Image (spheres, grey):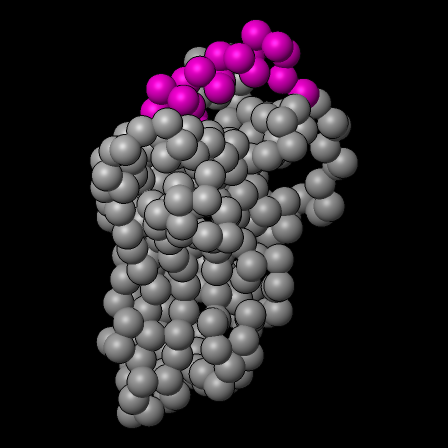
Amino acid sequence: MSVNQSLTGSDIAIFRKATSGARLDQVKTAASDRGFVLGVSLAAGHTRRIFHPHQVTTHEFAENTIYIRDLAENYKADLSTPFDFLLFQISQASLTRFADDAELSGITSLSVETASKDIVLSNLARALMPALERPQEASALFVEQMTTAIGTYLVQRYGGQGKAAPVRIRTLSRVHEDLAKSILVENLEGDISIAQVAEACNLSRGYFIRAFRETTGMTPYQWLLSERINRARGLLRTSNAPLAEVAIACGFADQSHFTRVFSTIAGVTPGNWRRNS
């Protein structure tokens, strides 16, 4: 493998696997009860020959095409060209939770797809690439938020119950909004799950994410990141603490992580911002 990365979310295991060689390779996996796997092709040009019980099919994967495979079925395929895939393994229990969050209880499987174009799913998946590249900096809150969005989209689009009913616009009560924000601020580094915050508000995970976004205009992770930057600005303005200390105090993994995120949001490095403030 030229790329072999992994990250574990609360409901989905995430991988990036890529090869650069063009030699023929065959993949065989025996049927298991591990659920489903979603693959998102990050590049064009991959071809695979899949062996079914009574036929063989050949598929060309363009960029942003996907496959969904039921791991309860035996699988055998020839991979004859390089590939670069983001992979998401979803257990049956996780699929049920995603369906419940999306108010689509009763979904127990996903439709099988091979080399189908899905830009929405590709964009959601690609948002997790920085977390795979720097797992030590990955916020558990962000990873869960993104995997929940992916799981919800999967059950809505590929769960076999047709188009989901429009979601009603709902907001958090003031009590729930204040409680959620206080919990998030107490866990500024982001090492808390959406499920924990939702449970504290006595709400389902899916309802909480939608209602929080409708109430604040931001996802929980976006709001928390905004709080981190606001706290950092305050410390930079009122103290002479080294940047490494400011980074840790504001929930960042280290000074490098802090500088990268702060520069992206503020447009300048923390050091330049401090000098100009």
Residue 176 position within the rendered picture, expressed as x and y whole percent measured from the top left: 55, 12
Instruction: Tell me if residue 95 can be seen.
Output: no
Task: Please tell me whether residue 243 is drawn above or below residue 125 in the rendered image.
Answer: above
Residues 254 and 72: in front is: 254
Which residue corresponds to the image point at 50% horizontal and 47% vertical from the top-left? 266
Whether 104 is drawn above or below 257: the answer is: above
Indicate left or right for 154 with 90 as reference.
right
269 falls in the magenta region = no
Q: Is 189 included in the stretch rendered in magenta?
A: yes
The image shows residue 26 at horizontal and vertical percentages of: 29, 81
Number of numbered callouts drawn: 0
- Magenta stretch, residue numbers: 171-196
Image coordinates of residue 202 in percent, x first then y, are: 50, 12
Q: Is residue 75 visible?
A: yes
In the picture, measured across the screen, residue 201 lies left or right of residue 92, that is right
Picture residue at 56% right of the left edge, 30% below the top: 209
Q: What type of secondary structure mainly makes up the magenta span?
A: helix
Furthest residue toward top:
175
Residue at the image point whose x is 31% and y is 29% from the top: 239
Q: Toward the viewer: 43 or 24?
A: 43
Work out which residue is located at the far bottom of the displayed protein and give it.
23
Residue at 46% across, 31% down = 230
Image quadrant containing the N terminus: bottom left
In the depicted structure, whether residue 142 falls above or below residue 263: above
Image position, residue 167 (x, y; %): 72, 32
